[in-house]
Amino acid sequence: MKSENIKKITTAAIEELVAALNAGRSEALSQYLAAMARFRAYSFLNVLLILRARPAAQRVAGYRTWQSFGRQVKHGEKGIMILAPMFRKQASAETNPQVEAEPSQLLTGFRAVYVWDEQQTEGKPLPEIARPQGDPGTSLPRLERFVRDRGIELRYSNDIAPALGMAEKGRITIRPDLTPAETFTTLVHEVAHLELHFDASRTDADKRMRETEAESVAHVVSSAVGLVPGGSSADYIALYGGDSKLILSSLENVRCTTSRILDAIEVGSPTNV
């Protein structure tokens, strides 16, 4: 892959990740970042309302939405008030007499509506969320080959549970019970550790920086092969105290490592389309 294409991919993905982190980097909003992946459909203000009313909320939805999932709000449970926008149709400005104007939506105000957390309901179990989604396809075996060609032992074992992956000098271990998307993202994360953090001359990287760099590389490469990391990367980085400033200060390290991995798995080649 051409270096300018890799730079473009890296820059776009990093900007996305930085924006996600910057949305919640203050003491007052510390819980917002951790909730981003859980409440993707809700606005910034509504996330704050949810967390204020029920700090431990995991997944929220309206009464009828829960019913559509086969779950029922428990008797006596109090709803969480959020704000729903109200719109009215407005004809768009006519700039060409030959083109029919289409109505647009004009925000006229907000109204109170109520949602309930999953723990306030009972019924059918819900699927897990906030995991990388998609199919890495041939990119996964290519990544595995890249690892082994560098003389790194790659093994799949549950011995490292509950960790998803682990990097040691000359070895990477991945849990065998992960989805292909999780396997790919986790393997990239561990490769990044070996590429960036097992050099004795690298003395500037503490735990925060190491995890921020590794997960930034995983986010970029996973996005490049068509996976959807979602909020998981931002949440992971925040878990280790990382932030957007750390990403930007390590941008060249992230970009160089990303470039080596993407070159090896040939993202964008005809066999990978």
Image: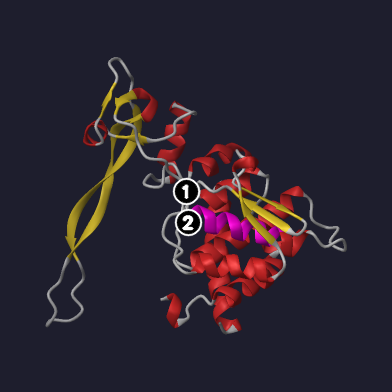
Residue identified by numbered label 1: 131
Image side of residue 85 versus residue 177, left or right: left
Q: Earlier in the sequence, mark 1 or mark 2?
A: 1
**Amino acid type at image mark 1:** Arg
- Image quadrant occupied by the N terminus: bottom right
Taking depth in this image into account, of 196 and 205 the one nearest to the observer is: 196
Residue 203 appears in the figure: yes
Is label 1 in a helix, a strand or a loop? loop
In the image, taking residue 38 as reference, residue 5 lies left or right, namely: right
Q: Which quarter of the figure is the C terminus placed in?
A: bottom left
Res 181 label: 2
Q: Is residue 49 left or right of residue 203?
A: left
The residue sitting at 55% across, 37% down in the picture is 31
Measuring 68% from the left and 45% from the top, which residue is drawn there? 241
Q: Are marks 1 and 2 in contact (CB under 8 Å)?
A: yes
Q: Which residues are magenta?
A: 180-193
Question: Does 191 lie within the magenta span?
Answer: yes
Above or below, 116 relative to 245: above
Where 185 sits versus 162, above or below?
below
Question: In the image, residue 154 lies at what x, y percent?
Answer: 65, 58
Report if residue 50 lies within the magenta region. Answer: no
Between the C-alphas of marks 1 and 2, the distance is 8 Å
Element class at badge 2: helix
Q: Could you tell me residue 146's position as x and y percent?
A: 62, 70
The answer to which image quadrant residue 60 occupies is top left
- Residue 85 to residue 99: above or below: above
